[in-house]
Amino acid sequence: MKSSMRTFILLAALALTACGFHLRGSQLQDMAFAFKSLYLKAPAETLFVSDLRTALNANKVALTSTADAAELVLEVVSEQTNKNILSLSGSGRVQEYQLIYRVSLRAYDNKQNDWLPPEEIMLTRILAYDDAQILAKEQEEAQLYRDMRTDAVGQAIRRLNRAKPQL
């Protein structure tokens, strides 16, 4: 009985992957934007900006070198990471941290019409901490920040996808 159930679950999983099933909106490629060219204005070339450039190129958005040549300017106003102590043990050692990743964005055209008013993408994760596993926890923290950055890029692309001029 158990082997027939496992076989059924395996066949169902294979059938779903074979038909090309994926959650709607989970793919960042092949989105239709209301603009063709974009200038990415950022205070520095951070990993977020680099990942955002890659995602925009994957969606065939022409990135221009000047704001005058672009239909839309996407300004990365700020990008911040914070780490707060969430809980302590009875002996005063840290048990959990709260990791916070914030990105502020604004999109406007050459006439200074807002397409996306200044918005903030804020993501948080909880990191359970143990003094005995310092290196592993540092790697886990770096992975959580990477995942939050990837999620923030996806949110930025989806917001640009539905951006329209606000008149």
Image (tube, rainbow, N blue to C red):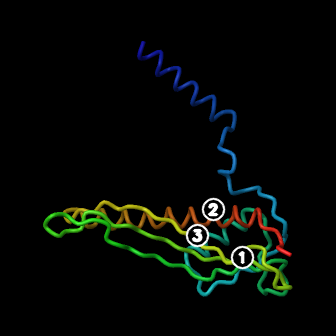
Q: Quadrant of the C terminus?
A: bottom right
Element carrying mark 2: helix
Q: Decide: is 114 above or below 4.
A: below
Q: Decide: is 46 above or below 88.
A: below
In the rendering, at what x and y percent does residue 24 appear?
69, 46
**What is the C-alpha distance between the residues marked 1 and 3?**
12 Å
In the rendering, at what x and y percent does residue 115 appear?
78, 74
Which residue is painted at 69% across and 64% down in the image?
157
Mark 1 or 3, closer to the camera: 1
Q: Mark 1 points at which residue?
A: 117
Which residue is painted at 72% across and 63% down in the image?
58
Q: Earlier in the sequence, mark 2 or mark 1?
A: 1
In the rendering, at what x and y percent does residue 141 appear?
38, 66
Element carrying mark 1: strand
What's the amino acid at mark 3? Ile
Q: Mark 3 points at which residue?
A: 121
Q: Quadrant of residue 138?
A: bottom left
Element carrying mark 3: strand
Q: Earlier in the sequence, mark 2 or mark 3?
A: 3
In the rendering, at what x and y percent does residue 85 appear?
31, 71
Q: Quadrant of residue 104?
A: bottom right
Q: Which of 135 and 109 is in front in this view?
A: 109
Q: For residue 154, which numbered disc appears in the image?
A: 2
Q: Which of 118 and 82 is in front in this view?
A: 118
Mark 2 or 3, closer to the camera: 3
**What is the C-alpha distance between the residues marked 2 and 3?**
11 Å
